[in-house]
Image (tube, rainbow, N blue to C red):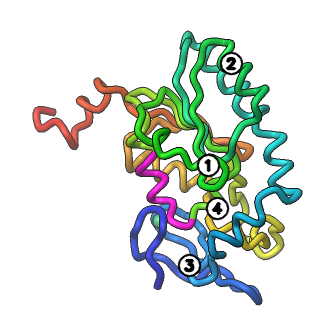
Amino acid sequence: MRRCPLCLKLETRLFFQDRKRSFHVCSHCALVFADGASHLPSNAIRQRYGRGGSLENQRQLPQFILPLLQELQAQGHNQLKGLNYGRVLDQSSLAHIQATGHELWQYDPFMAPDGESLQHSYDFICCFRVFEHFGAPHREWQLFTRLLKPGGYLAMSTRMLSDPQRFNKWHHKNNLAHVSFPGKATFEYLASASGFRLIFAENDCILMQKPSGSAIKRDPNTDPAV
Ligand SMILES: [Zn+2]
């Protein structure tokens, strides 16, 4: 039995096995994860950066962040401070965002390992096609919840496992750098366990909101008066 790398519970079982790896599923958060012994060393992951798949993700990154900012602006949020985690945005898109009055910090463990960016508080965090690389996703989840301001937004894009019965035919799992495979139920679990509001988890896009200070006070688990 393996400990779930996201919710840290022990109720997991072997889910699938192929010639290279075994995969397990967690009965609490529904995460499917590759056995830790099969994770690639970080230098091998670094070498994979820049290959076709990553370049395609790189091209799509602005198409993820810019509409997100437009949506937040449409809701009356201006001059936002955000963190783009895991994959660095190109300079022209970054300049465009800054010209609209927003501030965007970036963190990438290989291309921009700027520890200072993990010391701020943010109105939003975006994370495009990197969740699948998280070997210990509870760390990133704790990091995101710590760095987000009350009421802040977490926007992620990752391939979601929608049909566990077809996992054996899922091309996405064949990339050895992909080790975490959440489903919609995974984000429902995270929202429920943390008090976040799950705004949507559809079409491989997830938007969640950290509870505001007043919402936290209304939480019956933290307010003995309720
Ligand atoms: Zn779990």
Residue 221 located left or right of residue 182: left
Q: What residue type is labelled 3?
A: Gly
Is the residue 215 above or below the residue 7 in the image? above
Give the quadrant of residue 218.
top left
Dominant secondary structure (helix, strand or loop) of the stretch shown in magenta: helix
Measuring 42% from the left and 34% from the top, which residue is drawn there? 120
Q: Where is residue 12 in the image (x, y as percent from the top left)?
A: 49, 77
Q: Which amino acid does label 4 sit on?
A: His
> How much space separates mark 1 and mark 3, taking CA atoms?
22 Å
> How much space separates mark 1 and mark 2, taking CA atoms?
24 Å
Discs 1, 3 touching: Cβ within 8 Å:
no
Residue 207 seen in this snapshot? no
Q: Which amino acid does label 1 sit on?
A: Asp
Instruction: Looking at this view, name the residue that lies furthest to the left.
Output: 225
User: Does the numbered disc 1 mark a residue whose Cβ is under 8 Å from ligand 1?
Assistant: no
Front: mark 4 or 2 = 4
Residue 119 located left or right of residue 127: left
Tell me which label, 1 or 2, sits earlier in the chain: 2
Residue density around tag 1, few if under 14, some if 14–19, many if 20 or more, within 10 Å: some
Q: Residue under label 3, please give it.
A: 36
Q: Residue under label 1, please give it.
A: 108
Residue density around tag 2, few if under 14, some if 14–19, many if 20 or more, within 10 Å: few
Frontmost residue, 70 versus 164: 70
Front: mark 1 or 2 = 1
Frontmost residue, 140 versus 207: 140
Classify mark 1: helix, strand or loop. loop
> How much space separates mark 3 and mark 4, taking CA atoms?
12 Å
Q: Residue under label 4, please give it.
A: 133
> How much space separates mark 1 and mark 4, taking CA atoms?
12 Å
Instruction: Looking at this view, name the residue that lies furthest to the right.
Output: 52
